[in-house]
Image (cartoon, rainbow, N blue to C red):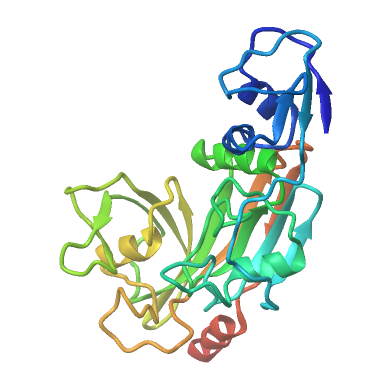
Amino acid sequence: MRLVVNSDGERIDKYLALNTDYSREFIGKMIKDGFIKVNDKSVKASYKVCLDDVIDIDESYKTQSDIEAEDVSFEIVYEDNDLMVINKPSGLVVHPGNGNTHNTLVNGLMMHNKKLSDIGGDDRPGIVHRIDKDTSGLMLVAKTNKCHELLSDDFKNKRVKRTYIALLKGVFPHDSATIDAPIGRDKNNRLKMTVTADNSKNAVTHLKVIKRYDKYTLVSLNLDTGRTHQIRVHMEYIGYPIYNDPVYTTHEATSFGQFLHSSEVDFIHPITKEHLHFKADLPKEFSDFLDKISE
């Protein structure tokens, strides 16, 4: 790729981030490794461009990754040149970690399309946000770095609205509630999060009742923040944990895991500026159980 600079005095990494699909971080790596030259000469990321500079970008630059493309089952709800909306099944881990580099959503994404954003790191191509292994439903995936950066900013500034559906143990007495309670790591169990004032971050969850059953409550939930296990922790905190949660209830859970589903996502496409709204039906195990307790 060759660009002729049309402005003056801006750092080259910033200029290219604004005028290409590459992130500023990735551009910095390319400059350091000699894949970007100005007027046929190597420069530093701090170099300030001049009007009519000729910038050559060697697009063969790749970062190394040990992640293999694999045939992993998930539904693509929507796809264009910039992003995908996928429906993740319960039980599927989002990205590799702890030495596990196989059978994750990322492996499946790479099988479908190797052109994914890379600013999240080598083990998280395309991943803008995540949901827990046993949480099902909608996720956004970025195919370009520019889209990834803009989506990340939208999430940070609460411009992406996500709605979850969960089945709670017990009959919740109110029609709605807001849980505003900080979340941090559980000192007694490093696999869990908990409501605590120590080394915690603020967390806000909004709840609305959809339907009450004899021993359960079906609710919809929206988040102002995106803390690890936020919904699961807040539901346990108020005394109505999510049904079948293997971590945050004391009852035995099946392999399906918690009845928590990312059911809707609503956002403005960061590139086309189109308003997009998607909805995903409950997984069969979830809907079948609701039918059973309705009898």
Residue 86 sits in quarter: bottom right
Residue 3 at what x, y percent from top left? 82, 24
Residue drawn where x is 60% and y is 67% of the image: 67
Residue 286 at what x, y percent from top left? 54, 81
Where the N terminus falls, by quadrant? top right
> In the picture shown, does residue 73 fall above or below 54?
below
Residue 189 at what x, y percent from top left? 21, 69
Residue drawn where x is 77% and y is 59% of the image: 78
Front residue of this view, candidates 98 and 233: 98
Residue drawn where x is 63% and y is 13% of the image: 48
Image position of 77 (left or right of 44): right
Front residue of this view, candidates 156 and 167: 156
Front residue of this view, candidates 206 and 261: 261
Residue 233 sits in quarter: bottom left
> Can see residue 125?
yes
> In the picture shown, does residue 204 fall above or below 278?
above
Front residue of this view, candidates 284 and 78: 78
